[in-house]
Image (cartoon, helix red, strand yellow):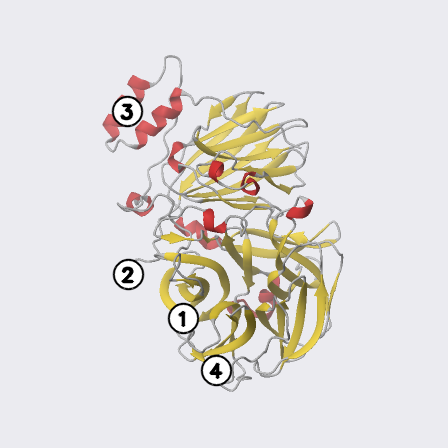
Amino acid sequence: MMGIDPRPVARSRGRRIGILITSIIAVVITVVLVIVLLPRGEEPVPEPSPSATPDAYATPEGWEQFRPTFHLTPEQHWINDPQRPVFVDGEWRLYYLYNADYPEGNGTEWHLATSTDMVTWKNRGVAIEKYRNGLGDILTGSAVVDERNTAGFGAGAIIALTTQQDDGVQRQSLFTSTDGGVTFQNYEGNPVMENPGATDWRDPKVVWDDARERWIMVLAEGERLGFYTSENLREWTYASDFVRTDYGLLECPDLFEMVDPTTGRRTWVLGVSADASATGGTTGFAYWTGAWDGERFSADTDEPQWLDGGADFYAAVTWDDPRDGDDGRLERRYALGWINNWAYARDLPGGSWQGGSLSTTREIVLREIEGRPTLLSQPVAALAAQEGTGATAPTLAVAPGETVDLPVQPRSDAYRLRAQVDAPDGGEVRLRFGSAEAEVTVGYDADAGVVFLDRRHDAVADAMPETYREIRTASVDADGSVSLDILVDASSVEVFTGDGRASLTSAAYVDARAGVTAEAVGAAVGIRNLSVTPLAVNDPNAP
């Protein structure tokens, strides 16, 4: 599909100069170095505008090599599935699975992180402890704000329905919080759903069905999803199922309604973390659009769509903002996922922590594309507040077979690169991040009509299983030109297209300060509206 060169060409002396310049503080010394070290006949590379508050974008002394600077990680031990956040007392309360005994012991519990902007998170400690009620560890589930006091624990109580696993048996338990979701208490009637004899019976996602004034639960049951209804969150009645046998073990389901504000079309969306690797697809958040009649979900088509085409957008959750009002809550949602993949989850490098990180929050909207309701996603707008003053370049032309340094380069360990890339038929644009020793390539192939992410030559690829080295793609209807929005951190790369139809999220390990080159394959290509801005360091474990 794409003629991707397995190795980059040699880096230019201009790249080495760029690296030297970043280590020099004094402006006068920097100018002298540029004059002395640039080869004869080359024009100096434009320097980015300095950040207004440079300390905000510099990692503190002793920061671990692969620790992200703006993605959420625990201070130590293990992280995996995020749990849908709730909005309480002016802040978001997000939970994720956490194993404080890793790597010596197994079992997860719910760890709490809070944020006011869905971007900068702070770890607050364990909210639901494992092994406390005799039913095992705490797996994935969902929390809801019981505004109507349907469960009888008080209006506004936070109710969490989670899977507990003991000796391989999975059951559903209920936990309550009257302090806004900071800590939870065990319900004496647990488990509220006893296992019927199924091997996989987990990950309850609970939502309110406003039209019928009752709760809906979607449960992952192997290669099927089970639907249940309840009046009080404690007693559940089976309603129907949804079966798909081509996407591996189904996990972390989701169910929600959205409206396309342009057409007014209302659509229910059923999502699930699934595996299409057997048919050459990705592993991540698959979704079907369709109708919900209070008992059963009817999909518009058998084949799902995918919210992200990358290798590592798994166990994703979506949510709405109660401040948007009834109409706004149907027009947009937010989502984030676990940047990891069970094919190599325990092999990814970390540091004092393991398990990767959680993704950047994205805003998702529903639009009708060629008659089919489709979810589009972009980084949440609040991320812009974490950007420093960057550098821009208007245009860059790259000849066929040529590789050049971008005229503006990153000067921080995490950054955001935006560009409009143009390629004619037969042309391909490759943006290479990092160095010849460790790089990730993001590109646009005009003939194939895809954006792609290639991490075959990052810092860890050689030690990873083959699936890690597979090139991930996402289709775009670009007609020769596509806008890219790329977020680079110490251990991940996230790619979004301008119209939101395509995104690629993957764990990736490069030296961000080593810079970016552009390569043209097959035809001359162009890069317009290029900008590189630093992203501020957010330490979720700082006081």
Q: Earlier in the sequence, mark 2 or mark 1?
A: 1
Q: Earlier in the sequence, mark 1 or mark 3?
A: 3
| Residue linked to disc 1 | 127
Q: CA distance from mark 2 to mark 3?
A: 39 Å
- Residue at position x 54%, y 28% in the image: 6
The percent position of residue 187, horizontal first and vertical second, equals: 48, 82
**Between discs 3 and 4, the one toward the N terminus:** 3
Q: Which of labels 2 and 3 is toward the front? A: 2
Indicate the amino acid at tag 2: Pro
Q: Which quadrant of the figure contains the C terminus?
A: bottom left
**Separation of residues labelled 1 and 3 (CA atoms):** 53 Å
The structure residue drawn at horizontal position 58% and vertical position 83%, both measured from the top left corner, is 232
Q: Quadrant of the N terminus?
A: top right
Who comes first in sequence, dot 2 or dot 3? 3
Q: Amino acid at mark 1?
A: Ala
Amino acid type, residue under disc 4 in the picture: Tyr
Give the structural element (helix, strand or loop) at label 4.
loop
Residue 47 placed where, x, y %?
36, 30
Mark seen at residue 187:
4
Few, some or many C-alpha atoms within 10 Å of disc 2 (few <14, some 14-19, many ≥20)? few
Q: Are marks 2 and 1 in contact (CB under 8 Å)?
A: no
User: What's the residue at 28%, 47% (across, down)?
Assistant: 60
Residue 543 numbered mark, or none = 2
SS label for mark 3: helix
Do we see residue 434 in this rendering?
no
- Give residue 525's position: percent from left, percent from top: 58, 26
Read off the residue under disc 3: 31
